[in-house]
Image (cartoon, rainbow, N blue to C red):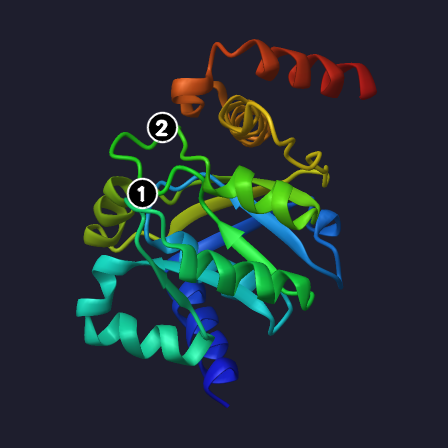
Amino acid sequence: MGFRFVRYLVRVILALIARVEIIGLENLPAQGAYLATGNHAGRLEVLLIYSIIERTDIILMIAEKYRKSAIWRWFARRVDGIFIDRYNADLSALRQVLRRLEQGGVLAMAPEGTRSTTGTLQPAQPGAAYLAAKSGVPVVPVGVIGTWDQEVVQNLKKLKRIKVTLRIGQAYSLPPLKNQDRQSQLQQYTEEIMCQIAALLPAERRGYYAEHPRLFEILKMKNNST
């Protein structure tokens, strides 16, 4: 009952404040575990997760600082969210996530770890790469435009509905981590994840990864396939 109520509430709120366009919805697996990775420009993205993914086994990691908020604690209980310490090795939270992925859940995660203050991509943390390689589940990249907190607040003050666009890319997989040079592998996997996201964003939103060679390779492959 709690989850269904939250989803209903989220959809009502989004219908009132935003016009949401989704491109590539067919790329989201209907069943089985996967890791959805996206850019993190604002708080509105959390609502989008529960509005778009038509499943009840969503895994959401919530920054530990929000545990102090009664609203966020209420929300976390209703959606079975996992509070995580983003700045230290929170092994307990990671074990919970991996266990739920093994059970077939969907993990929605922003590799950057925190909201961008500029609305563009920031350097990412290795957590998403670690979970993807450790679990072996497919990774689905998502590029979100229109959720930057600053723009959202400006539009709402003017009583204007927000235009949000989601571009969902095709799933891919990351090889298991080898025993040697794991940090280098994690860095490479993290860059792969972020470049896949960057390829779904307009050039002005690609930020830190705008000039990455891997991004150019992905864009070239996309152009050749069209």
Pointer 1: what residue? 114
Residue furthest to the right in view is: 225
Compared with 88, 204 (above or below) is above
x then y, percent, for residue 130: 54, 41
CB within 8 Å, label 1 to label 2: yes
Name the spot of residue 222 as percent of width and height, x first.
73, 21
Quarter location, residue 146 = top left
Report helix, strand or loop for mark 2: loop
The residue that appears at 63% across and 65% down in the rendered structure is 105
At x 44% / y 44%, what residue is drawn?
110
- Residue at 22%, 44% in the rendered image: 154
* Quarter occupied by residue 12: bottom left
Query: Neighbour class for label 2 at 10 Å: few (<14), some, many (≥20)?
Result: many
- Residue at image point 80% right, 14% down: 224
Q: Is residue 45 left or right of residue 157?
A: right
Give the camera-side residue of 55 and 163.
55
Q: Secondary structure at mark 1?
A: loop
> Is the C terminus in the top left, top right, bottom left or bottom right quadrant?
top right
Residue holding disc 2: 122
Depicted 120 relative to depicted 36: above or below: above
Q: Compared with residue 82, is residue 119 higher up or lower down, i.e. above or below?
A: above
Q: CA distance from mark 1 to mark 2?
A: 9 Å
> Mark 1 or mark 2, which has the lower sequence index?
1
Q: Amino acid at mark 2?
A: Gln
Q: Is residue 131 left or right of residue 205?
A: right
* Kind of residue sitting beneath label 1: Thr
